[in-house]
Amino acid sequence: MLCERLNCEMIIRLDPTTNQDQVIQQAKAVLLQGGLVACPTESFYGLAVDACNEAAIHTLFSLKKRDPGRPVLILIPSTEFLRDYVTHIPPVAFPLIRQFWPGGLTLIFEASKKISPLLTGGTGTIGIRLSSHPIPTALARAIQGPVTGTSANPSGAPPSRHAREVKAQFGEMIDLIIDSGETGGGIGSTVLDVTIRPPQIVRDGMLPRQALERAIRAATASPGCRSSPNART
């Protein structure tokens, strides 16, 4: 286990007021060595690996027993990183990013060559989100790149709201579990495909459908949709 080599516990209780920086640094070390980190998200616990590490991605799919044809979304450190992982950003995406990121909206883009075909499920597209939860965003910022944003459970099993449930599902196969108590539960992110026009809602989730549909109509009609949300050029 990586944590044994790195001299850290498998489950670390996180207290944002006292040890968050230390926990993130320990998780960073695990991620950069190809390890798996379970961490809280807005809804359930998720599994994070370095989304640019092919071996780590293979380990993630194997651990979850996930069908290789099912894509896995990525969580980015900030909007400035978006252009690194997509071939282009459709104009309609800019106002949606400004309105809903960070938050519960996953946008599907054409994937750049930096993205593993495993993460795209062979589709050539990739789901990307800027999380509103501080921990996965801090992990992505720590490694200066994307982390995976898939739920911490085997495929088909119930998602986990407690660190102990993650441990019960995977045993010693997780390198590090960041325990911040019970998560909020509910449903996952809303998934919107912006590679087609008009954008299509692929999965309902955290965002109310009517509010998103209004935003899509406004974004499609707005001449200002061509302005950039501080994405790098």
Image (cartoon, helix red, strand yellow):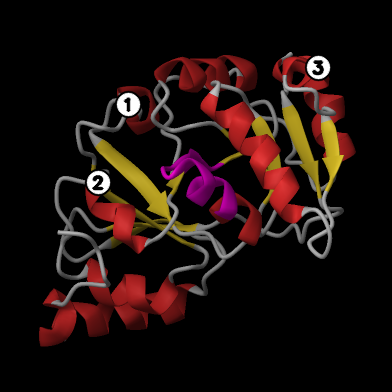
Return the x and y of residue 17 as percentages of the image width and height.
82, 65
Residue highlighted by disc 3: 172
Return the x and y of residue 74 as percentages of the image width and height.
44, 43
Q: Is residue 217 left or right of residue 73?
A: left
Q: Look at the image and tell me in which quarter the C terminus lies.
A: bottom left
Residue appearing at x 26%, y 40% in the figure: 125
Mark 1 → mark 3, Cα distance in angstroms:
26 Å
Identify whether 117 is placed above or below 76. Answer: above
Q: Bounds of the magenta span?
A: 138-149
Q: Amino acid at mark 3?
A: Glu
Q: Amino acid at mark 1?
A: Ser
Return the x and y of residue 126 as percentages of the image width and height.
32, 42
Q: Amino acid at mark 2?
A: Asp
Mark 2 → mark 3, Cα distance in angstroms:
34 Å
Mark 2 → mark 1, Cα distance in angstroms:
13 Å
Tell me which corner region of the image, top left, top right, bottom left or bottom right, holds residue 167.
top right
Residue appearing at x 51%, y 20% in the figure: 56
Q: Earlier in the sequence, mark 2 or mark 3?
A: 2
Q: Residues within 10 Å of mark 3 (few under 14, many from 20)?
A: few
Residue highlighted by disc 2: 84
Comparing labels 2 and 1, the label whose residue is closer to the camera? 2
Q: Earlier in the sequence, mark 2 or mark 1?
A: 2
Instruction: Find out whether residue 211 is within the magenta segment.
Output: no
Instruction: Find out whether residue 141 is within the magenta segment.
Output: yes
Q: Earlier in the sequence, mark 1 or mark 3?
A: 1
Q: Look at the image and tell me in which quarter the N terminus lies.
A: top right
Residue highlighted by disc 1: 116
Q: Secondary structure beneath disc 3?
A: helix
Q: Do the residues bearing badges 2 and 1 touch, measured as CB atoms within 8 Å?
A: no
Identify whether 139 is placed above or below 7. Answer: below
Q: Secondary structure beneath disc 2?
A: helix
Q: Secondary structure beneath disc 1?
A: loop
